[in-house]
Amino acid sequence: MRRLLCVLIAAGLVTPIPQAAAKPPEKTSFEVMTPASTVASRTDRRPNAGGIFDPVARKTFISWSGKAADTYVQAYDHRTGAWTAPKKIADGESDPHNYPTMLLAGDGHLLIFRGMHNTRTVISRAPRAHSLEGTWTDTEVPEGDAASYPMPVKTADGTLFLFYRETTNQVTPGANTDFRPMKYLVSRDNGRTWRNSVQLTGKQWAFGSLGRADHMDEVYVGQLRYLPSAGRIQFVYTLAGGGPAQHKHDVYHRNVHYLSFDVRTLHFFSAAGRDLGTQVDDAEQERYLKVAETPLELPGGLKSPDYILQVGTQRDGKPFVTWFQFDAAGSPRDFAGAWNGRDWEVREVANGLRLREIEQLNGGTWRVYGTRDGQPNIETFLLENGRVWKPETVITTPKPVQRVEMITGFRDPARILATGASSARDVSVADGDIYVAGTPHK
């Protein structure tokens, strides 16, 4: 039939009906809620586990740092469209590093994790399943001593992993102050008991380095991402340390690295699939894990990677990472590195943005959330397979934003949690807003 129609059109016996031009895709529209105003202090939280949707309760739960870095939680009821008032869960000891991260355990109880900056791991547990109500209990986990920057994951079978960075000289006198490797905790009983990576593998650390000539033996994980279908956790991280002439904490930054972890075997892998066993050392890190080589620079200096980086997967399952570093004028420059099966293809994709978080839309298409220093709003962009970048839309916020995090298992209109920027670095000042944004229901 199609061939006959083509013949008739060619003979002038049938006039083709003009086809309407394809309608361009509409830009995604976001609506912004403000669960709490002028309450947020400065925080160092990474884009990981700030909130979660509970399908049983039909509620979205969020956590954030208020005055003195104290931990607060709130709930959004998707049936009524109402937010609960902020509820204080625990003290933050006036340290912005003591940020909360949140998981919903397999028994339905919410858990809040805090690495009390170089000292201890504390877990707060909700007394009622699928609820914030009641008096939460705090438990110190001795297996997670000297911990900072907790990054929790719940796997498909309900196992809980909590990755953290150890400040080793707090538990091993004489260790250099810039030796700070990554370790992890594991619980198979919904967070009641834990074992650490040393107990599970017999290795001194999970990944990191010791004895580098440049003393860059601190790990800053920018983000981790759990891939349930692969049973893997992806990591992107940068290095810090005192530099060649000294042992000091976080004086210099350099380089971007990628790593994955098998939650069943506890083995680490490179992007090329090389099995690195249960501990990664510096020789392996340098040979197999490096995405980008950057100069030894002060944090915030020329070509210094920031503390926050993002990690995702391309359409074919290969990894990509994003990060920003600074130019000579102090302006962010934005990069993406995509693994092609042999090497990392790194390119500059934008400039002027602090990249905050990424969201997988479909296949290899990801939404990137970014902010500009001192300006309100969150700008979004589409990144295809870690290579092709294009602007998408703007999420309007009344004031500037300092952090953006995907809400785990989100249900719109509560898709992202955005912590408003405080006007001061001192956590005694808490005047940032708490925003939650998503696409409106039609």
Image (spheres, rainbow, N blue to C red):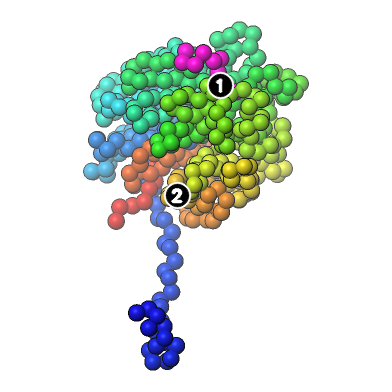
Residue 374 in sight in this render: no
Residue 402 in the magenta stretch? The answer is: no
Q: Position of residue 397 (x, y in %)?
A: 45, 48
Task: Please tell me which of labels 1 and 2 falls first in the chain.
Answer: 1
Q: Position of residue 206 (x, y in %)?
A: 54, 21
Measure the alpha-carbon separation of dots 1 and 2. 31 Å
Q: Secondary structure at mark 1?
A: loop
Q: Nearer the viewer, residue 102 or 65?
A: 102
Q: Is 341 situated above or below 161? A: below
**Viewer-nearest residue: 338 or 131:** 338
How many numbered markers are drawn? Answer: 2
Which dot marks residue 279? 1
> How crowded is the residue under tag 1: few (<14 C-alpha within 10 Å), some, or many (20+)?
many
Q: Residue at x 47, y 13 (%)?
A: 199
Please give the name of the residue rendered at 52% of the width and 52% of the height, measured from the top-left corner.
384
Label 2 Cα neighbours within 10 Å, binned few <14 / some 14-19 / many ≥20:
few
> Which quadrant of the figure has residue 135?
top left
| Magenta stretch, residue numbers | 199-208
Position of residue 396 measured from the top left corner of the image (x, y, whole percent): 45, 51
Q: Residue tagged by mark 2? A: 363
With respect to residue 416, does 150 lie above or below? above
Amino acid at pointer 1: Gln
Residue 200 painted magenta: yes
Which residue is nearer to you in this view: 13 or 280?
13
Which image quarter holds the C terminus?
Answer: bottom left
Q: Residue lying furthest right in this view?
A: 245
Residue at 56% over, 41% down:
321
* Vertical relation: 74 (above or below) 116: below
Query: In the visual, does 6 lie left or right of 288?
Result: left
